[in-house]
Amino acid sequence: MQHESGDGLKVVGASGQISLGKRYAGKALRVETRDDGTILLTPVVLVPESQMWTLAEPDRSRISRGMAWAGDNPPRKSELAALSAKAGADRPRRGARRRGKP
């Protein structure tokens, strides 16, 4: 008898495959074969190696804080003229000498 949770008897076909149902379609599963012959399937999420840094500290905490900040601070219209003026004031003009340098 099969339960709603998907538990039940499964028969391995001639090709060595079993069907777990649509609930697991496209999912990655870790297969663990134990000494007593039982097989444990655990759904897993695969993370590309290039994105592993997002799971390690201090980046993980920084990302969490940034996401929390973004949730508390909805986007608002920028005043482009003010931002442009500020950016221009913060950077030296081309060809201008910096103070203290010849």
Image (cartoon, helix red, strand yellow):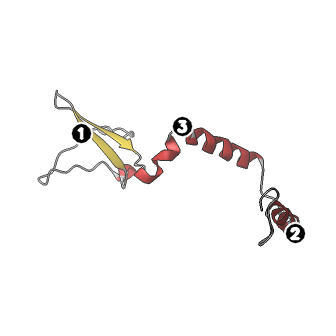
Residue type of the residue flagged with mark 2:
Ala
Considering the numbered disc 2 on the image, is that residue within a helix, a strand or a loop?
helix
In the rendered image, which residue does mark 3 sit on? 57
**Res 34 quadrant in image:** top left
Q: What residue is at 25 percent from the left and 36 percent from the top?
A: 32
Image quadrant in which you'd find residue 78: bottom right
The single residue placed furthest to the bottom in the displayed view is: 95
Q: Nearer the viewer, mark 3 or mark 1?
A: 3
- Which sits earlier in the primary sequence, circle 3 or circle 1? 1
Residue 48 visible (yes or no): no
Question: Where does residue 21 sit, x and y in percent of width and height?
Answer: 33, 50
Amino acid under disc 1: Leu
Residue 12 lies, in percent from the top left, at: 17, 47
Whether residue 5 is visible, yes or no, is: yes
Query: Which residue is denoted by mark 1 in the rendering?
Result: 9
Amino acid under label 3? Glu
Contact check, label 3 and label 2, Cβ < 8 Å: no
Which residue does the image show at 72% across and 45% down from the upper left?
69
Mark 1 or mark 2, which is nearer to you?
2
Along the viewing direction, whichever of 79 and 25 lies nearer the viewer: 79
Q: Earlier in the sequence, mark 3 or mark 2?
A: 3
Tell me if residue 20 comes above or below residue 82 in the rendering: above
Q: How many marks?
A: 3
Give coordinates of residue 77: x percent, y percent.
83, 63
Question: Which circle marks residue 81 in the picture?
Answer: 2
Closest to the observer: 100 or 69? 100
